[in-house]
Image (cartoon, grey):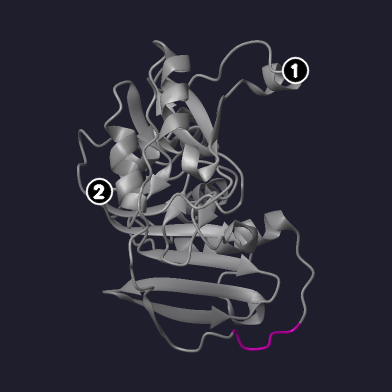
Amino acid sequence: MAVAHQVARAAVEPPNLIGSTAAPPCPAVTLTQDDLKKIAAYKAVEHVRSGMVVGLGTGSTAKHAVDRIAQLLRQGKLKNIVGIPTSTQTHEQAVSLGIPLSDLDSHAAVDLAIDGADEVDPELNLVKGRGGSLLREKMVESVAKKFIVIVDESKLVKYVGGSRLAMPVEVVQFCWSHSLKRLEDLFAYAGCVGQLRKTATAAAADGGGKAYVTDNGNYIIDLYFEKEIGDLNEASDVILRLPGIVDHGMFIGLATSVIVAGVDGVTIKTKKGNELELDYFCYSDLRNGF
């Protein structure tokens, strides 16, 4: 008999904000979404220093950061960088650009990780993994001394799951349908619907065809919520206690900074203990134009 488990909402105070909560007026600039991603990525790479071990993220935003690091290496502005890729895709990109690579077995301490996110909530909790690389991303980014998240403003949400788009869960292939049903039961109170991720070609063919397989040989179940799921740490715990679950796409408390590129400028949110420090930049103020 299936039992639905409701996760209670915790009474957690939002972080205090340091600095103005309103961005200063900036001159109007016409930018595409990809321009915004590139701006955020370039701003993050300003934190990379020679000799660092750098976690290289995966996805359309992180790709710009990897490109920029390679460009600075070629120009001699960065030296002795070691990259730790978070996916086969990023590994191939970095190799093609000549970035020296290693892994966590050889470099267990990561100085800085830079990656995108699918959602960012007001406490800098994230949803990641819609690109399929959540496990390796979490392994690398959880051991980084600094983890800078780069997004455009469309990724900001009021709560995790607030976009009504997928919150991925990586599962073993064995009896994946059973795992999907148990996940739906866990979050039935939030109107949860689970769906096995298919390859892009298969998804276009009325859901038929092959399941998407991660770099680790697992499947992904995408969860969609109608309501908030409550306390994220409790939600994480109940998911990970299910046999057959590898990991989920909630990155709770891992981000140290989030760089948000919007049409009005760039906002940088940085954790300072229990507070968030806010900085704003107009595009005319940014160094290293894009």
Is residue 112 or residue 97 the one in the foreground? 112
Is residue 74 or residue 23 the one in the foreground? 23
Is residue 147 or residue 82 the one in the foreground? 147
Residue 100 against residue 220 in the figure, above or below: below
Q: Where is mark 1, residue-wise?
A: 206
**In whole angstroms, how far apart are the C-alphas of marks 2 and 1?**
40 Å
- Asked if residue 60 lies left or right of residue 263, the reply is left
> Magenta segment: does it hold 25?
yes
Where's the C terminus, which quadrant?
Answer: bottom right
Q: Measured from the top left, where is residue 152 in percent x and y?
A: 61, 60
- Circle 2 sits in a helix, a strand or a loop, which is it? loop
The answer to whether any part of residue 86 appears in the image is no
**Magenta stretch?**
23-27
Residue 101 against residue 213 in the figure, above or below: below
Is residue 150 or residue 9 the one in the foreground? 9
Residue drawn at x 33%, y 55% is 254
The answer to whether any part of residue 229 appears in the image is yes
Where's the N terminus, which quadrant?
Answer: top left
The answer to which quarter of the image holds residue 267 is bottom right
> Amino acid type of disc 2?
Val
- Asked if residue 92 lies left or right of residue 172, the reply is right
The answer to which quarter of the image holds residue 39 is bottom right
Q: Where is mark 2, residue-wise?
A: 143
Mark 2 or 1, closer to the camera? 1
Q: Do the residues bearing badges 2 and 1 touch, measured as CB atoms within 8 Å?
A: no
- Asked if residue 172 lies left or right of residue 69, the reply is left
Q: Residue furthest front?
A: 1
Residue drawn at x 64%, y 75% is 265
Q: Main secondary structure of the magenta part?
A: loop
- Circle 1 sits in a helix, a strand or a loop, which is it? loop
What crowding class fits label 2: few (fewer than 14 Cα within 10 Å), some (14-19), or many (20 or more)?
A: some
